[in-house]
Image (cartoon, rainbow, N blue to C red):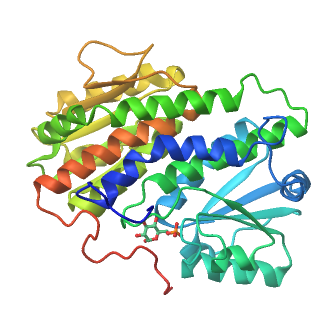
Amino acid sequence: SDIEKGTYPHYMLKEIDEQPSVVRKIIQAYENEQGELAIDPAIAEALHEADRLYIIAAGTSYHAGLVGKEYFEKIARIPVEVHISSEFGYNMPLLSEKPLFIFITQSGETADSRQVLVKIKELGYPTLTITNVPGSTLSREADYTMLLHAGPEIAVASTKAYVAQVAVLAIAAYVEAKSQRIEVNFDLKKELAIVANAIQSIVDSKEVFEIASKDYLSTTRNAFFIGRNIDYCVSVEGALKLKEISYIQAEGFAGGELKHGTIALIEEGTPVIALVTQKSVSLNIRGNVKEVTARGANPCIISMEGMEQDGDAIVLPQVHPLLTPLMSVVPLQLISYYAALYRGCDVDKPRNLAKSVTVE
Ligand code: G6P
């Protein structure tokens, strides 16, 4: 069944492996009878009515929200703000006239997110929950729900739910853009199928990531993840994954920001994992890699076919530039997994963490 580990040593590894099928399942779940991507017309209407989207989430779901902002703004041209639930509760920004609140939550039970939902309902604004759990508290209490169809996620560190969240956000933005007759120059359904295959090829070559993890992370005290543009959104998620399960101190940075302070922490051998999947900023991020390498860092460049260079540690298959987060997060999940294994950590149940935090 879905919640058995089977032959897997850990749920996390099983859930990483399920990601290609999760993407395929989402394509099917959001297909209409004509085989086109579609969403609930009431949700399409709510997106259409909104002058601004407020994405509210915690942890990994917040990181998916950062990618969601890119999608809604770039594909559907709706302005978006992304907020951490626990902050939003007492520090509400000035709201637009017609906000739509989108709660992203794997469990649908996170108390920090729920307290925002309760407040927003009191104010009378429309709400949408994007969750993996039908019937969960945030699903029941919001006006609308979009499901992730990722199947039960047992490992505390979220993997397939993140990929599902990003895929569903892409679909929502894409369908909204189409319905507004905004020109979209790609076929999302086709591109998501390409992503599913790309993820498959990554999870089929685990040795590569096991070795990279050993090379870069087996003895280090800390690690940095850098990226620009949409790669930055993924770098913070990569850092979170590593912290959660291996207890290595890690931070994700926008490529250009590291030099404004944190570069002081770079020592001989400090791993700096750089994502290079965005052509428009690839020279800039490679420049940042040179800066840290000159100060002794051990650079691990993860690039993509079409923009790879000699010396890149990992070259990922080519996918649509907006969809890279769905794929580039997977090597980061895998290197974190192996780092946790080497260090003898409890991969599925890291210390001090809970799968779903139901206290504020
Ligand atoms: C907990 C988990 C994280 C998760 C966060 C948000 O802190 O340990 O992995 O990202 O809650 O959970 P949610 O269910 O709201 O997505």
Front in this rendered view, residue 83 or 36: 36
What residue sits 49% from the left and 24% below the top? 281
| Tag count | 0
Residue drawn at x 37%, y 24% as measured from the top left:
303
Q: Would residue 316 appear left or right of 339 to someone viewing this image? A: right
| Residue 6, position as x, y percentages in the image | 31, 58
Q: Residue at x 40, y 36 (%)?
A: 255
In the picture as drawn, the residue positioned furthest to the front comes out as 1
359, above or below 45, in the image: below
Left or right of 305? Residue 111 is right
Q: Position of residue 89 (x, y in %)?
A: 63, 79
Residue 216 can be seen, yes or no: yes
Give the quarter of the image for residue 54. Answer: bottom right
List x then y, in percent, for residue 282.
Answer: 44, 22
Please name the residue shown 80% across and 62% down the image.
100
Q: Which quadrant of the figure has residue 290?
A: top left
> Is 351 located above or below residue 165 in the figure?
below
Q: Is residue 155 above or below residue 277?
A: below
Say whether residue 90 is visible: no
Residue 90, percent across and down? 62, 81
Q: Which quarter of the figure is the N terminus placed in? A: bottom left
Residue closer to the observer: 252 or 349: 349
